[in-house]
Image (tube, helix red, strand yellow):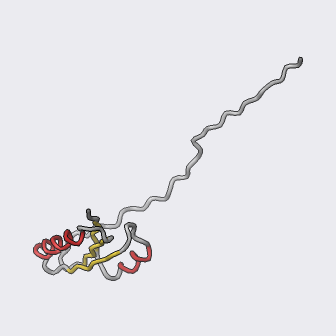
Amino acid sequence: MSEKTVELELLNPRGEIEPLTTLAPAPRVTDLAGKKVGLYWNNKPGMDNFYTVFEELLKKKFPTTTTTLLMGAFEIRDEDADAWVPEIDTFVYGVGD
């Protein structure tokens, strides 16, 4: 009987993952006076009530601020965000339950 040599190759299961390009956060609005604020609602129950009270408090503190209700799915699509850019200065994203 002849002996056979067995060779094993050891592989690293982690693999190589290329890091994603990171982006800096958008500059924050420093003052809401005179700004147009979008209120994003994904139709979850209760968020409409929250935004009603939120708008009242916002108007008390910043009387010249205007609000616009923005509606859509849970995840904001790029085409929606692009359409809102000329209409608002900043936005609030909230969910209800």
Numbered-mark total: 0
Occupied quadrant, residue 80? bottom left
The residue lying toward the viewer, choosing from 51 and 89, is: 51
Occupied quadrant, residue 37? bottom left
Residue 69 location, x and y as percent? Answer: 27, 78
The residue lying toward the viewer, choosing from 49 and 53, is: 49
Residue 89 location, x and y as percent? Answer: 29, 76
The residue lying toward the viewer, choosing from 43 and 65, is: 43
Query: Residue at 11% of width from left, 72% of height from top?
Result: 61
Left or right of 87 on screen, residue 56:
left
Residue 29 location, x and y as percent? Answer: 25, 70
Left or right of 11 on screen, residue 50:
left
Query: Residue at 35% of width from left, 79% of height from top?
Result: 84
42 shown above or below 19: below
Q: Residue furthest right?
A: 1
Q: Residue furthest left?
A: 60
Residue 27 location, x and y as percent? Answer: 31, 67
56 shown above or below 14: below
Occupied quadrant, residue 97? bottom left
Query: Residue at 31% of width from left, 71% of height from top?
Result: 43
Query: Residue at 40% of width from left, 67% of height from top?
Result: 75
